[in-house]
């Protein structure tokens, strides 16, 4: 195996790993989706035009990358979903999992920071 092929394989492997983490991030509110998909796109751009094109044109993932690159933002539906799921999971943790006051305060501050960040991102206008 040539050195160039080995490096290409590492890039493809890393890209695939980041796609998987990004996919999980769609369902887990504390795990961001877009940064991992951007990393995957960078890895694929360095290794495989076919994987890169697949990611950018993917029905599920492509819009995250395209909207970010074009500065369009996040849909209102995605913001509401993310904040709601985040409130449920962190609220559950504050009430049932974390027992010390400092831990509860840290979780609340994390919640507040993420909500602030999501609200600061431009809301994607629905195209008609």
Image (tube, rainbow, N blue to C red):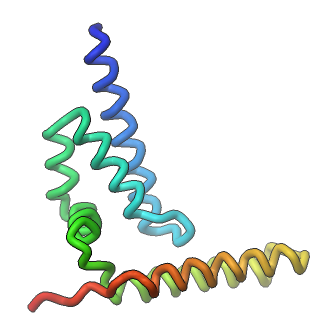
Q: Is residue 127 left or right of residue 14?
A: left
Front one among 32 and 23 = 32
Name the quadrant of the C terminus. bottom left
Q: What residue lies at 53% left-to-right and 81% top-to-bottom?
A: 85
Tag count: 0
Q: Is residue 110 left or right of residue 7?
A: right
Q: What residue lies at 39% left-to-right and 81% top-to-bottom?
A: 121
Q: What residue lies at 56% left-to-right and 78% top-to-bottom?
A: 114
Q: Is residue 108 above or below residue 45?
A: below
Q: What residue lies at 41% left-to-right and 43% top-to-bottom?
A: 17
Q: Position of residue 61 (x, y in %)?
A: 27, 61
Q: Is residue 63 above or below residue 43?
A: below
> Where is residue 122, by image quadrant?
bottom left
Q: Position of residue 100 (x, y in %)?
A: 90, 75
Q: Position of residue 18 (x, y in %)?
A: 40, 48
Q: Is residue 10 above or below residue 111?
A: above
Name the quadrant of the N terminus. top left
Q: Position of residue 69 (x, y in %)?
A: 24, 65
Residue at the left extreme of this rendering: 128
Front one among 94 and 44 = 44
Residue at the right extreme of this rendering: 100
């Amino acid at each position: 195996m040539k050195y160039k092929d080995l490096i290409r394989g590492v890039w493809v492997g890393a890209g695939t790993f980041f796609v998987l983490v990004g996919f999980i991030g769609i369902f887990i509110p504390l795990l961001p989706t877009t940064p991992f998909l951007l990393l995957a796109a960078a890895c694929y751009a360095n290794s495989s035009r076919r994987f890169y094109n697949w990611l950018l044109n993917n029905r599920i993932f492509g819009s995250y990358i395209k909207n970010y690159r074009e500065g369009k933002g996040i849909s209102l539906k995605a913001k509401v979903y993310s904040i709601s799921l985040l409130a449920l999971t962190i609220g559950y943790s504050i009430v049932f999992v974390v027992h010390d006051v400092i831990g509860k305060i840290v979780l609340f501050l994390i919640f507040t920071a993420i909500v602030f960040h999501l609200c600061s991102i431009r809301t994607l206008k629905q195209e008609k």
